[in-house]
Image (spheres, rainbow, N blue to C red):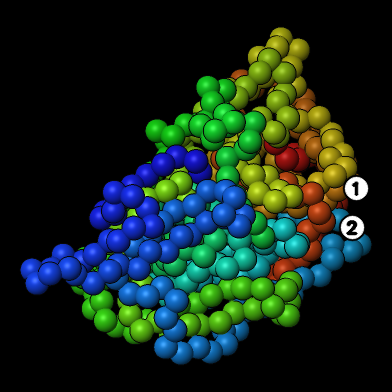
Amino acid sequence: MAHYLAMGSIPPKRHTQHRRPSRRGPGELYYEELMGEEGFSSDSSLLYHRGIPSAIAGSREWAVGDLTTMPNHPLLPRHLTLHDLFDDKAIRATDAVTGRRLVLGNGDVRISYAVTGEDSPWYKNGIGDECVYVERGQGSVQTVFGSFEVGEGDYVIIPRATIHRWLPKRSRKNPLRLYVIEGAGHIAPPKRFLSRYGQLLEHAPYCERDLRLPEGPLLAEDIGEDPATATNVYIKHRGNGPGGIVGTVHTLPHHPLDVVGWDGCLYPYVFNVADYEPITGRVHQPPPAHQVFEGQNFVVCNFVPRKVDYHPLSIPVPYYHSNVDSDEVMFYVDGDYEARKGSGIGKGSISLHPGGHPHGPQPGAMERSIGVHYFDELAVMVDTFRPLELGEAGRACDDGAYAGSWTRGEGAGDR
């Protein structure tokens, strides 16, 4: 995100002495860390630590959970019911890092789901950026850049290798539900929405004013914790595990919240889906009109409440389409799904429409949509350019019947 920020205590010029305040001569040097992408050739930030960022007091392996996947074979469209994955007892013991269950994945992106009742450990993803959509609930995210209060409808974008933790607001009726999109590379606004220098352009459906930035700097003592406390940090990184992923726990000799200041263009931020301004037209708009982020070989779109097609002969639901290069994953968050009657899809559902199979409205949906001028719906879509495989959670919550919904009579397909 090429949007320069500076927070806390930093020296006037980079890579120069920056010392702790002292009444007895020069104070100790802070430790400068460059956190940068693409080998010093893309966005970066400089962080000034009280402790040595490379220091490790101990290490052990971390079993990151079941990351095995199985091909979608035989090739079928599928309906996955995410709300069936966690019961009340499981929620109370689940955190946002170790409790994720893998729904779908390939070499470019993994989609997981977690319903959390416990604070997560400190964590960083050493493989790629994370885009975490908050389906329900509230909580806070503490990072070395600062903190965020998060809630329903927030996309939380966390750059690769950012140390952070999730602290849910405990609620039996409204636990923190997270839809986690983990990339194998970086996740950013679509290039077509950006100027050559990285500013969001006038035709983009959101702008820099809509982004929530970290509140910081955040130090251990600011949250009532001891800066000298040895702390475990869980790390997901490349290795010989399923999907080429393994885990390690590093024990740091100090608390990770030791950054007194930072500046640059690389940092976590939050964007709420309610601030997305939908692009509409006289006839049905294709999914790229709803794009919000992009990653390596995948895109993220959101379908928000909006005015729909206003040509006098328009058909608001989509035409049948064979998106031959992509698998399409739609996560249904909110809204009125009367047009989907008969398909079984509702809040908390995922539909998987694989490349190689045409999909679209189910019998009767086209006629019923004629004359409709507003869709009250909210969904998050991920389109991938390599086939998705089913993770253990996807296999566990597949309804097994969705593929037949186009031949059962009434129903509706994707938006």
Q: Residue 65's quadrant in the figure?
A: bottom right
Please, what secondary structure does the residue beneath circle 2 have?
Answer: loop
Q: Residue 179: in sight, yes or no?
A: no
Disc 2: which residue:
75
Q: Which residue type does callout 1 highlight?
A: Gly
| Vertical relation: 183 (above or below) 155 | below
Q: Which residue shows up at 44% across the image and 53% down it?
A: 45
> In the rendered structure, which disc, 1 or 2, sits on the residue that comes first in sequence?
2
Q: Which residue shows up at 51% across the image and 32% down it?
A: 199
Whether residue 168 sits left or right of residue 219 in the image: it is: right
Check whether the beta carbons of the residues at disc 1 and disc 2 lie within 8 A of each other: yes
Q: Residue 284: in sight, yes or no?
A: yes
Q: Position of residue 258 (x, y in %)?
A: 31, 69
| Vertical relation: 376 (above or below) 396 | above
**311 or 16, nearer to the observer:** 16
Q: Position of residue 303 (x, y in %)?
A: 60, 37
Please, what secondary structure does the residue beneath circle 1 have?
Answer: loop
Q: Which residue type does callout 2 highlight?
A: Leu
Quadrant (top left/top right/bottom left/bottom right) for the C terminus: top right
**80 or 236, nearer to the observer:** 236
Q: Which residue shows up at 82% across the image and 56% down it?
A: 387
| Vertical relation: 348 (above or below) 280 | below
Q: Position of residue 290 (x, y in %)?
A: 63, 33
Q: Which mark is residue 356?
A: 1
Q: Position of residue 137 (x, y in %)?
A: 41, 56
